[in-house]
Image (cartoon, rainbow, N blue to C red):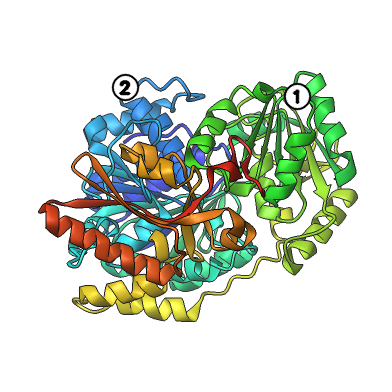
Amino acid sequence: MIESSKKLIDEVINYINRLDRVSAIPVIEAPTGYGKSVSAPIIAYISNEKGFSYNLIHVLPLRAIVEDLYVCKYLYALGRNVPACRAEPPKPFYEALRSMGVSENDVAYQMGFDYMLRGVGIKSPAYDAKIVISTLDSFALNFLRIPVNEVYREIKHYAIPRTRIFTSTVFLDEAHMINRFDDESSGKMLAFLKLLIEFSLTTETPLIVASATLWSGFREKVASWSSNRAVFFTICREDGKNGHRICVRDREFENHAKSIKWHTQVIEESELVSKVMEHVERGEKVLVVRDRIEDAVELYSKLDLNESEKVLIHGRLCLEDREKALDASRRAKVVVATPIVEAGVDWDFDAGFRDATNIPSAVQVFGRVCRARHDCEGSVYLIKPSKAPNELAYTDAVKLVSFVKSHSNIDWRIPYSYSSDRGEEVKGYQELLELSSAMLREDQEAENMFRWLVTPVTIPSDYIDIIMSEYGRYGSILRSPLAQFYVYGMKRLYDAKSVQDVISGLISYSYDLLNLFRSCVEGVACVVQIDETIVSKCSAELRYVTELQRECAEFFSRVGKERGKQIRPVFVGYVFREECYRRGIGLVRR
């Protein structure tokens, strides 16, 4: 049996190895940087050896994390030379892949559109690889019998990818990001998680849930959805078992974590620039995460640094610029970002700043400070907000600021509280998580719809079309409706010669962007690939999303029939004038 070198993960492996059948949902609760993500192939190997599954589907909430894990862990371990990666995977990761007998051709990714701008890898929308690293959106569509590669086709072969899900070990990573109180789609994601847990137990499909930042309310939901068949594996001060909670004390991890000397402060927004520059002048690397894109852009512009010394990352950068920013972030002195970078990406900073508005996010962000070093001094700052995204965020900010002001010693790596060598009380981050005001309410309408999709023996393709038109616009049935935006103008889109030319200029964002930058909208477009040829239909006349989607579907169908070949939809969305986009900064009003 493969050992992970992490005591908590080994406890999970031993538990699975003792099972005669899939009868429980293991939930791994471990701090950031502990090694949860790289344990996935080890756990899948054990499940395969037990006859519980044949392959692995590693599910993550964000495309950036999918790409980083796929390229910098899986492909790297299988011999691909990827210089942009910070560190190689641990030895047990290599051993698990070798034991499963996989090669580079057996490992694939799946995410909306073609986001792999590094030009490497294999895409597998039908989940027909031995290991697939997938976004949650793609996984949900395939699970709900809406095949991601056939959304625009008249006949949908949903049985193939769905069957492969039920022969897999499903590793649901960064599960805390399913619920974000500043995101109205949380109710849909919670409804989907509830259904996934129920079906995995009914079909005896191995499901592993992993997170660094669960709190008691989330655990209670998972326990209820699983009819108390979830088993929580947690890093604790002492070994032990309490009902369905298994506590593991990992002294090696604890000693490493305790070597970090934490300095936690609350600062006003007016102090932010000067505090960041203090750390830069000391030769330290800094991460700043702001809730609002506007605040991130403003801070970036105020930092008196060269362009090569600072990086800006947010959701309104086109894919090409975001990829360049992620690569440049490894060398920059300061990374300014929104919460899209808070989980999964393997970074290491000396100082971290975060708006004090989201407690789980703060724990995740500060988990990027002193991530891979012993005897490190980590400085973390909570920015007292002048405004908050909503009432719950404001409530969290008040609680968090009050807690930090009352407790000078906080350990952002160890979840439990303890006494220091000098006898001082040190608060673990779990106490902070329990302050979270995040609401955990499943969307009942979404749950009913999901059950209708998965319960019947068969469902007609036209019903799937209706569901996607109403709820799954532009590739997600879980999130608030998103649109695709091309930022380099109609002429450049029309002249595109490859899929890469198109996707490099894309932004996926909510429809609010249309209202914010309406004067920048040049028109709409449908783009499809046939063989190696790009075929586009562009119009200066704006369309409502449902009308645009229907019109593009008809265009794709007509082109496919006329050419007598299989089509590959590339883009359905809105086109911004090129002068409204500033490279490395994002959309700007003209």
Identified by mark 1, the residue type is Leu
Please name the residue shown 49% across and 42% down the image.
488
Residues at marks 1 and 2 touching, judged by CB atoms closer than 8 Å: no
Q: Badge 1, how many Cα within 10 Å: few under 14, some, many 20+?
A: some
In terms of image quadrants, where is residue 518? bottom right
Q: Quadrant of the N terminus?
A: top left
Position in image of residue 531 (x %, y %): 18, 42
**Image x and y of residue 386, in percent:** 85, 55
User: Between 230 and 491, which is closer to the camera in this rendering?
Assistant: 491
- Side of 39 where 187 appears, left or right: right
- Local secondary structure at mark 1: loop
Q: Earlier in the sequence, mark 1 or mark 2?
A: 2
Decide: is 117 above or below 461. above
Q: Is residue 106 above or below residue 159?
A: above
Query: Quarter of the image holding residue 41?
Result: top left
Q: Mark 1 to mark 2: distance in Å?
A: 37 Å
Q: Which residue is mark 1?
A: 305
Q: Residue furthest left?
A: 564
Which mark is nearer the camera, 1 or 2? Answer: 1
| Residue of label 2 | 79
Q: In terms of depth relative to the viewer, which is nearer, 311 or 131?
A: 311
Q: Secondary structure under badge 2?
A: loop
**Where's residue 177, x and y in %?**
55, 55
